[in-house]
Image (cartoon, rainbow, N blue to C red):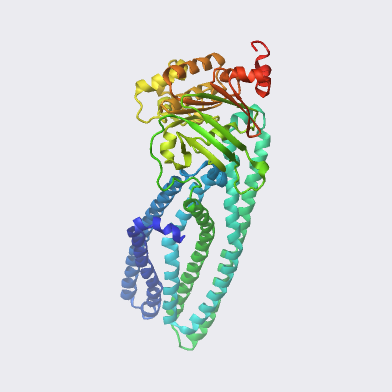
Amino acid sequence: MIKLLKYLKPYLKYAVAAPLFLFVEVILELQQPRLMGDIVDIGILSRDMDFVFATGLKMIAFALIMSAGGLGCMYFSSKTSQLFGKDIRDAMFENIQTFSFSDIDKFQTASLVTRLTNDVTQIQQLVMMGLRMMIRAPLLATGGFLMAARLNLKLSAVLAAALLILTFFIVIIMRSAFPLFSMIQQKLDKVNSVMRENLSGIRVIKAFVRSDYEKKRFASANNELTNAGIKAGNIMALTFPIMIIVMNFTTVAVLWLGGYLAGAGEIEVGKILAFINYTTQILFSFLMLAFMFVFISRAYASVARINDVLSYKSSMQNPENPVKDEITEGCIEFKNVFFKYNDGDKDDDKYELRGINLKIKPGETIAILGETGSGKSTLVNLIPRLYDATSGQVLIDGRDVRSYDIETLRAGIGVVPQDTVLFSGTVAENIRWGNPDAREDEIKQYAQISQASEFLDTLPGGYNTVIGQRGIGLSGGQRQRIAIARAIIKKPKILILDDSTSAVDVMTEVKIQQGFREKLSGCTWVIIAQRISTALDADRIIVLKDGAIAEQGTHSELIAQGGIYYDIYKSQLGTEGI
């Protein structure tokens, strides 16, 4: 928690104001039992009704001031906690934006969502309740004990013994509960993971009639979370009955000993009444502390998870003196590149790419083919440095991509990923992701190149049509064409198309390629293709197998070799035209 206190510093004035208001409330609350005792001992026993009336008015005035103090404390503690949580969420989100793909894989998306939401909420509650209960309870307990001790030391000894017994039980309960709260957050991660997968894949679930299976999977994760919560709840539920038992026994002991002392003339009846009220205040303040320890136990697990994100340094950092020169040529070179997703894995069989040596000239069009899992997407992800090569070098315009400023590097590269992702908003806003300063006529121009204008011009809202998250409401081909427009409006020197026309018909694909040649001359293309028709006109075709280059050459050269490419061609288009 100490590491997070810097986010509290800007709101220190609110954090200080809350306990100041609280201090006023507690001081006046501690006067109430004493005044009540005076009413009994001085007013009622001496039948001085003026004293009773005056003291009663004083108690009412104190109660009103206490209410104002409580409201002030609640206002400032709430404001502090909300602003504190906002800044932590901002800091976490900002740091997550620096994460590489491998970093995201390490934390897992569902876990990051939980940390940004539920975990931050936990520490917000801790701050809010800490500024109120964590300060109020010790003040009330300490002040109450001192006020009770002034009334009678013998009765205070009974109270001290009760507090020791209560403290012992609270410590035992907290030690048992803490591991369970860490488990609850982990189970919540799992629930979020299942829920996120279901919401994003709802159409697939319905298409394959797997709703029953997914319900069972969610129920399993939900039951695990529920069971962990019940275990923690059962342990924490012991706090209140133990507190009540100790309070009742203490009250009985105080009454018994107080009656004996009153009979001996060592204490007045009003003071016994006041002492019992102080005892109640003290024991309830211990109950508040017990509940605070519950929040601390649960929030401590959240604090650790938040600190993991905030303190994590991305595995992909800018060099000390990064190259900020724009990509001007678009030359790409792979020098003996090996890659595996888990660098710590010593098993050589885990390499996704093996000994890749490849040079792509400026303005050249390269098509990459290969069976599923051959490393096609992995290879192109190394170009914009979405991953770093495990060994070897990836060069752009003669410079290692790791020497570039990351933003400068990616600004010169357009990427249309295999999984087409659009964002909620208008079509124009989605295309402007590639160039925030793009004019309306430019948006239309590049939508025309990608053949997106073909269907956008027919929509009632045109380019201002609002689409749902991930492009809900559009077909796969329509989403791909918008994604292509988004990439090419950057006017990149390197364009990576990762199977980005798989949902587009062949005629539309031909039109898109013609538009590229006319409007994007000089741009280096790297195309991952599943269809042979996509690769036919490429300057060179690369065939990957098991993470290595198995064949490369022009269409005619590879057909003449009669190897893997020949087999792919024959399986898709037959022997006609060979």
Kindly indicate the quadrant of the structure image that contains residue 537: top right
443 up-or-down from 49: above or below: above
Q: Position of residue 176 (x, y in %)?
A: 61, 63
450 up-or-down from 293: above or below: above
In the displayed image of the protein, which residue is found farthest to the top?
576
Q: For this view, does 355 lie left or right of residue 52?
A: right
Name the quarter where the C terminus is drawn. Answer: top right
Most foreground residue, 487 or 577: 577
Q: Position of residue 355 (x, y in %)?
A: 61, 37
Q: Residue at x 45, y 87 (%)?
A: 266
Q: Position of residue 477 (x, y in %)?
A: 53, 21
Most foreground residue, 513 or 146: 513
Circle count: 0
Q: Residue at x 65, y 28 (%)?
A: 371
Kindly indicate the quadrant of the structure image that contains residue 81: bottom left
Q: Residue at x 33, y 72 (%)?
A: 55
Kindly indicate the quadrant of the structure image that contains residue 34: bottom left
Q: For this view, does 354 lie left or right of residue 122?
A: right
Q: For this view, does 90 lie left or right of residue 369?
A: left
493 up-or-down from 181: above or below: above
Most foreground residue, 547 or 202: 547
Is residue 461 visible to us here?
A: no
Q: Position of residue 287 (x, y in %)?
A: 51, 66
